[in-house]
Image (spheres, rainbow, N blue to C red):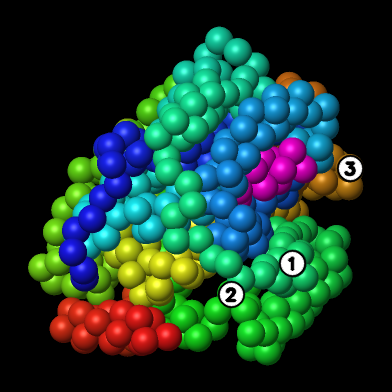
Amino acid sequence: MGADQAPARSKLVLLSLILAAAVANLNLSVANVALPDIGDWFDASQTQLNLVAVGYSLGLASTVVYLGALGDRYGRKGMLLLGVGLAMPVSILTALAPTVELLAVARVFGGFTAGMAFPTTLALITALWSGQARTRSIALWSAAGGAIAALGPISAGAVLTGFHWPAVFLLTLPLAVIAFGLNWKFVPGGVAESKGSVDNLSGVVSIIAVGCVVLGINFAAEPDEGSLAIALGVVGLSLVAFFFLRQRRLKNPLYDLEYAKRRIFWVAAVAGIIVFGTLMGTMFIGQQYMQNVLDYSTVVSGLMILPAALLMLVVAPQSAKLIKARGSRFTLLAGYLACLLGFLVMLVFWTEDAGLLPVAAAYGLIGIGVGLAGTPASHSLTGSVPVKRVGMASATADLQRDLGGAIMQSILGAFLTAGYAASFASRIASSPNANQVSDDVQSELTKSFSSAAQTAEQYPKYTDQIIEAAKQSFLKGDDLAFLAGAVAIVLGAVVIYLFFPNRQEEDELLTSYAGEDSAS
């Protein structure tokens, strides 16, 4: 593992980097608790709400590889400060968005600024620390990032008690100011940076490819957007294929497949995408479930994330010790088991009359799972590549969170959308008054829960029936979403079990990687 090394004033440096990452992490989840209010304000469809929720992850996921490489080449500290600095005006523009479409676009641009800062934080940790000191630092970085993302709904819920929904997008402004000042003062620059050129064409292709794939997943659930979803998927997957073929031919690729094909690297990447995506996907669906079905206030809905945040902070340091004692594969599988149990609790106990305990228990299990699996997922990436390629590894670690969040939110959101619309349409068809429901009214009822609630206000005689039908339809949709999440967890666990090395083989492989990299 190498001798323990740390930079001067290491605690202040690590605090600065964690706060910079916090700006990105907090913005990931603040929108979730405001989605019902946003839906009411803009009369938004479920797909539009999905895009608002996923837009930030989309912007971040599509840029981290390219911007991580630019940071490696032209200066990580400069890229970090640029991202944190631009987050301030973009937050203000997001709060001022006049339409739901522009709100989604502003969220994407917010993700771009995070793409400048977030991958750089892990790259600097990997470059500045080594040995067990690096493992402990990554564990703190990972736990703090997950916990802050989970705390987003709590702070947003509190803000919404006294302010309108745009205020949630201003929460990160003071944090960004503090993070900018601390990183300017304490974080060193010019640490093990690359001298090679950056393949800008591959960078642009990677941005478009990820964007097309994620948008295609979101539009797949829209009944009239099947052709668009297929077209986006075909373009996105074609660009992914072009990207990887191009990387094989380049002398200095943007994404070095020689390192990416290492077992420890690619299995950890897949494992992280699923487990971090699980956290973001369940927070996305859960906030709507608590407010729409359980009628919780924004404050209570936000506070219900607290078990996940606290348990992530408690478990993550133990995860670092477990890696040392039992290896990364054991630790990853333990985290996956906790996440699977969380999904099972949601499927069985998240009903229309569920109390606080089932919600807290499910989120607590997800928090334990992410706390256990997050550290080995990130540590395995950065430990299996040389320092000169740490930007690529840290970008992949960020992709775990952001692409995982974008994909899992999109997949779970698509299942929620499809399940809700199909269930409500079935209820209308079986109603004795079905012939009195016009196509326009049915379209509004099946569009989203918030749209159904607005329609219910126009028909006071049927308000209770419409709201009850909307709740039951939402439950059908979220059951489909949680089932899809459980399947993803099981598939991920199979990949980890079959392909990730055991503890002894992991140590041997990491030692051989270090030898190969030193020789080259």
- Residue beneath the point at 38% across and 81% down: 517
Element carrying mark 3? helix
Residue 309: image location, x then y, percent: 33, 39
Q: Name the residue carrying label 1.
A: 200
SS for dot 2: loop
514 on left or right of 186: left
- Tag 3: Cα neighbours inside 10 Å, few (<14), some, or many (≥20)? few
Secondary structure, magenta segment, majority class:
helix
First to last magenta residue range: 105-116
> Residue 211 location in percent, x, y?
72, 61
Viewer can see residue 172: yes
Residues marked 1 and 3 touching at CB (< 8 Å): no
Sequence-wise first label, 2 or 1: 1
Q: Residue type at mark 2?
A: Tyr
Q: Nearer the viewer, residue 169 or 12?
A: 12
Amino acid type, callout 1? Asn
Q: Report x, y in % for residue 79.
A: 59, 47
Q: For the C terminus, give its image quadrant.
A: bottom left
| Circle nearer the N terminus (2, 3) | 2
Residue 110 part of the magenta-drawn span: yes
Indicate yes or no whether the magenta region holds residue 259. no
Q: Nearer the viewer, mark 1 or mark 3?
A: 1
| Earlier sequence position, callout 1 versus callout 3 | 1
Q: Which residue is labeled 3 in the image? A: 440
**Whether label 2 touches label 3, CB < 8 Å:** no
CA gap, disc 2 and disc 3: 49 Å
Q: Which mark is residue 461?
A: none
**What's the mark number on residue 255?**
2
Q: In the image, is residue 255 above or below residue 340?
A: below
